[in-house]
Amino acid sequence: MPVPEKAKVKVISVADMIEQYVNVEDSLRFKRSQEEPLNVNVIKDVVTTEVIAEKIREIKPTIVESVKKEELVIVPKVRKTHPLPIKKPKKEYGIYRVESGDVLGRIAQKFGLTSQELLALNNLDKKSTLRVGQKFKIPLPQKTVDSISSATYVIETGDTLLSIAYKFNIEPKDLVSFNHIKSNTIIREGKKLSLPLPHIMKKIEAEKKRLALKKKAEAKKKKLAEAKRAKEKAKKRKLTKHKVKMIRGFGKHKLRVTATAYSSHRGQTDSTPFLAAWNNRIRPGMKIIAVSRDMLTRYGLRNGSRVRIGGLKGYYTVRDKMNKRYRKRIDIYMGVNRRRALRWGRRSVMLYW
């Protein structure tokens, strides 16, 4: 079967149709210095898609079928409207109460303000004095003001370490280290976190510095005390050495002996308590000693020898001798003071002669 030939279709746009069927007069013009009135022929019939389609059918019926509906739509004029005013959210204000030791600059710095801004916000001037308990209006929510004042934050639903750190403008790692926790620690609602805010860190640094200075002062004081003790000890040692030198300079011999004490009583001597060996007469107050016989025969002491006894002042003279059963022994004369002799008892001393 032969294929029928396609009908040739001519497409006419809406703009062409309007130019053909609508008569538009010129707009208002200025002629020299006078206005020329607009001469417009008012079109009584409203041009609609149906009118245009009817006119086109009169010319050629097949054209209407090919014209798209969108090309026949007359766009209505849109009326300009003013946008509705956007309501700005109300700014929240919190209250801060002045504490002991607060100054205006520190309060302003604590909340990220300047002193002038804080004064202007609270209708104050530079000459105003602060009182403990005085209220300051702060441009932050009350919860935030309380958290910054106490440097603690109570965890709420949906909080994370990162969100808390960004909320108070601090580094997350500082928040983690300050609370001695790990970055992956699960935080629970209702628990408290300490905030490493600048004013808190400054206070901690000042306290550390104060403790360091105190520790340094105590160390210096301790060092001075030790030096003083060492000096006194050296002085004492020097005096002791001098004494020893003096004692040693007294003679060439020294011997450690056992020293006892006696008094002029018949129970401690014989029937003649004031008469010593070699017929030496003794009396209370004299610095004399009795020596064992080996001290006379072996170590070179004799009647009238002058000796020094370690720990006792002055010089003692050998005026008596002891029983032959004693060895390396001396007996110190205490006069008639029997109690003093008993208090002395028995001691080990160095003897120099």
Image (cartoon, rainbow, N blue to C red):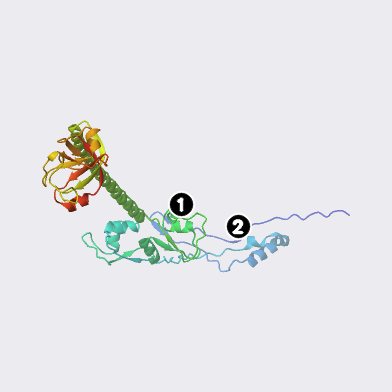
**Amino acid type at image mark 2:** Ala
The image shows residue 348 at horizontal and vertical percentages of 26, 43
Farthest top residue in view:
252
Residue 234, compared with residue 176, is above or below; it is above
- The circle on residue 328 is none
With 249 as the anchor, is 14 left or right in this view? right
From the image, state whether disc 2 or disc 1 is nearer to you. Answer: 1
The amino acid marked with disc number 1 is Lys
> Which residue lies under the disc numbered 1?
173
The Cα–Cα distance between marks 2 and 1, rounded to whole angstroms, is 69 Å
Residue 113 visible (yes or no): no
Q: Nearer the viewer, residue 136 or 339?
A: 339
Image coords of residue 105 (percent x, y): 28, 56
Please name the residue shown 67% across and 60% down the image.
68
Answer with mark 2 or mark 1, whichever residue precedes in sequence: 2
- Choose between 13 and 178: the one closer to the eye: 178
- Left or right: 118 with respect to 166? left
Residue 65, relative to residue 319: is it above or below?
Answer: below
- Corner quadrant of residue 120: bottom left
Residue bearing the label numbered 2: 15
Asked whether residue 337 is in view, the answer is yes
Q: Quick check: 251 left or right of 137?
A: left
Are the residues tagged 2 and 1 within 8 Å (C-beta)?
no
Q: Quick check: 174 above or below 44? A: above
